[in-house]
Image (cartoon, grey):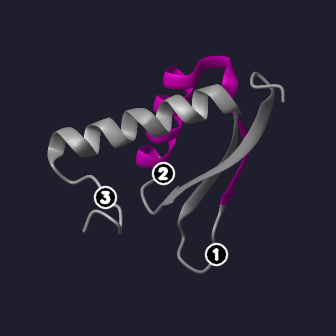
Amino acid sequence: MDWERQTGVRITVNGADDVAVEAAAGELRARFGNRFAVVGRRRQRSRGAVEVEAMLLVSVTASEDAGAADLLDLLYAGRAPVPAAAA
């Protein structure tokens, strides 16, 4: 198995505040660099909210690292899930 194979993940950021949505997309771009790209913008007619659609390239290794980091954060916060056998 190729652990460094990258795959695209679709991300949608939406909200009623155009500036906040664009700022969130900008922060993702700053965090992920060239691996993050906005592919479309549209306004939802029903709510008047703006929606930014983007793609993020991730590798299996990077997603496992992110999952491990999230679990460590939960452990340190005392909110980690308890396995059913240990409960």
Q: CA distance from mark 2 to mark 3?
A: 36 Å
Q: Could you tell me if residue 86 is visible in this image?
A: yes
Q: Main secondary structure of the magenta part?
A: helix
Q: What kind of residue is marked 3?
A: Pro
Q: Give the number of the disc on residue 81.
A: 3
Q: How busy is the neighbourhood of tag 2: few (under 14 within 10 Å), some, or many (20 plus)?
A: some
> What residue lies at 46% left-to-right and 30% top-to-bottom?
27
The residue range painted magenta reads 19-42
Q: How busy is the neighbourhood of tag 3: few (under 14 within 10 Å), some, or many (20 plus)?
A: few
- x and y, in percent, of residue 63 in the image: 59, 35
Q: CA distance from mark 2 to mark 1?
A: 14 Å
Residue tagged by mark 1? Answer: 45
Q: Quadrant of the C terminus?
A: bottom left
The answer to whether marks 2 and 3 mark residues whose Cβ atoms lie closer than 8 Å is: no
Residue tagged by mark 2? Answer: 18
Q: Nearer the viewer, mark 1 or mark 3?
A: 3
Q: Dot 2: what SS?
A: helix
